[in-house]
Image: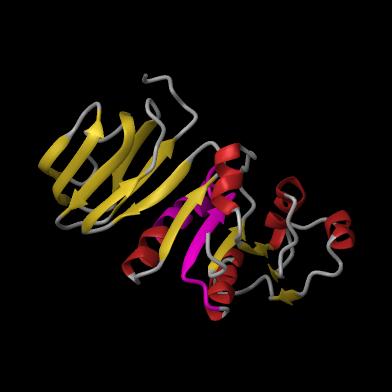
Amino acid sequence: MTRSTFTILLGGALTLTERLAAQLSGSRFIAADGGIRHAKALGVKPELWVGDFDSTDEALFADYADVPRERYPAAKSATDGELAVEAALARGATSLVFAGALGGTRSDHAFLHLLRLAALAQEGHAAFMTSGEEEAYPLMPGVGEIDLPKGSLFSILGFTDLSGLSIENARYPLDDFALPFGSSRTISNVAEGPVRFSLKSGRAVVLARPYDLSGA
């Protein structure tokens, strides 16, 4: 991973796995408010800590007193995560990893993260999200591949109608398929190894569970 990759530490669930450690190797880190609690488990020290700090307890302030902070008012027009992304892009980030973006106690934030992932991809930024046990990738028009272990579950969630959707190297392949908005047709597929996708039009995310082999 290049030094232009930034990992944004967010407040959702995060489980340290071998796959996660490999994905974050060589990354730079920015913490968004309470997301800094993941830094200890990852064995990293963020270069910046941003937010309104309403989700941070005094023990974390003491543990990371030497990390530079950017404090914002609680009444602001962007989430702490979005502020962290802006800071990463200002530092030259060309690739973003959102660690702790999935799960957690705020489903509105988790859903917003998925939308933000699609928006970043539309803007031309490489990005994905992970909880260690679950991962999310943007699916935009074009061709791409996700390196998934054989037997792992994955689903495609469309934010729009999808046209020309093809899935290769999966138990349930598709070829030039039209997926209506809201359809469950692409839920719970099983990877046969790295999965290849192509899409002619539409916006979606791929949710994958690389350690969930229940469909194998």
Count the labels in the image: 0
Is the residue 48 above or below the residue 103 in the image? below
Q: Quadrant of residue 188?
A: top left
Give the left or right position of residue 189, taking residue 30 as reference: left
For the question of whether residue 79 can be seen, the reply is yes
For the question of whether residue 105 can be seen, the reply is no
Give the left or right position of residue 42, taking residue 102 as reference: right
Q: Is the C terminus in the top left, top right, bottom left or bottom right quadrant? A: top left
The figure's colour scheme reads secondary structure
Relative to the observer, which residue lies in front, 176 or 179? 176
Q: Quadrant of residue 15?
A: top right
Residue at 49%, 39% in the rendered image = 134
Relative to the observer, which residue lies in front, 210 or 158? 210
Give the left or right position of residue 113, taking residue 33 as reference: left
Residue 99: image x %, image y %? 58, 52
In magenta, the rendered stretch is 92-115
Asked if the magenta segment contains residue 113, the reply would be yes
Asked if the magenta segment contains residue 150, the reply would be no
Residue at 25%, 35% in the rendered image = 186
Residue at 26%, 56% in the rendered image = 203
Is the residue 128 above or below the residue 15 in the image? below
Residue 110: image x %, image y %? 50, 50
Residue 51: image x %, image y %? 68, 69
